[in-house]
Amino acid sequence: MNDVVADIFNTTPSDWYKHLPFYVQDDVDQAIVQFQGLSGDLAQDPVDLFQARARGWLAYCYLVVHFDQWEKKDWNCDGAVDLGDAADVKSQAQSLVNSARGHSEKDYDIRWAYAYERLFYGDFAEAKQTLDVIFTSQTVGSDEEQIPPSESGVYAECADMYVYLGEVDEAVRRAREAISIAMEDGTRAPDWYFWTLAWALYHRAIIASKPATQRREILLTQAQRALRLMRRARTAKRFDFDALRLQAVISEELSDNWERDNCRHLYLTTKANRKGGKVWRLDDEMARSPFDTKNSMASDLRDNWEAVCSKLL
């Protein structure tokens, strides 16, 4: 493990959010090993909030690994879960989250992990209610755990989930808040915040109006700019498969054929690195896109995403 990553795990959870989503995707095997170590004895209750939060993150890793189908290396290093089996992954994630919630149901970090697990279980109503509580509880005088400014990533992660629930205005709002809060201390917001904003803006544009209107074009252009702010958007990293593909989709909407073709070429050559050499199919993409099909807006977004991905995959 490199020194930067070691420093992350030597800090309190308040520093995790700015770094770990990228870390999980760049070295998911090591992330799982670390979170297993930080989670303590899983046969016992968490001894403190640090352990409880680590179990929530471990559940997140399991779900990301399975549904994103990362290249298999040492995912099953402790023999606890077969990450190739959906039922086993979900069961293990649920067990970890329940254990974390047994320690604290009011902690925003644990609530976020619970909402993520519920999303992939298809319990969309519970996922949305949990996300809403995270933010409605952030009021003066509330006895709920408050989100400190250092954990601006909570806003970005929740923004991503709001898209799948069809709450695109809320998604855009929370993604922008994440960037704004992160930059208050004069530092640059992490790249993945801009990815989340672009993802939210794209879907907001899709429902803005059809056929294309000026409002739709403005939102798409804003999404395109957010992606271009990602410093890593043109390097051969795992996360870039998503960024480059979304850039291609947006360029298609804006009739920028050169940009579309260029991004498509780049993400196709990145695909082997992103997906462990497997041929990434449309079914794979939709399996990792848990849109709430019972929500009319989310269902429309899913249909659109399936249509555009079928052209580009």
Image (cartoon, rainbow, N blue to C red):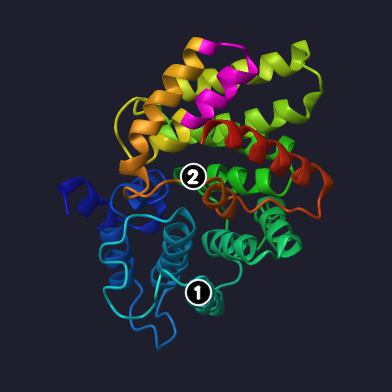
The magenta segment = 245-257
Q: Residue at x 31, y 61 (%)?
A: 72
Q: Position of residue 230 (x, y in %)?
A: 41, 26
Q: Position of residue 63 (x, y in %)?
A: 48, 62
Secondary element under disc 2, as helix, strand or loop, is helix
Q: Residues within 10 Å of mark 1 (few under 14, many from 20)?
A: many
Q: Residue at x 36, y 43 (%)?
A: 274
Q: Is residue 3 left or right of residue 127?
A: left
Lower position in the chain sequence, tag 1 or tag 2: 1
Q: Residue at x 60, y 15 (%)?
A: 221
Q: Is residue 177 left or right of residue 28?
A: right
* Secondary structure mostly seen in the magenta stretch: helix
- 142 or 156: nearer the eye? 156
- Number of numbered markers: 2
Q: Is residue 95 left or right of residue 273?
A: right
- 96 or 74: nearer the eye? 74
Image quadrant of residue 215?
top right
Taking the image as drawn, is residue 183 in sight? no
Q: Is residue 2 above or below residue 215?
A: below
Image quadrant of residue 128?
bottom right
Q: Position of residue 65 (x, y in %)?
A: 41, 59
Q: Position of residue 76 (x, y in %)?
A: 31, 73
The residue identified by callout 1 is 100
Queried whether the magenta region covers residue 112, the answer comes back as no
Q: Residue at x 64, y 19 (%)?
A: 253
Q: Residues within 10 Å of mark 2 (few under 14, many from 20)?
A: many
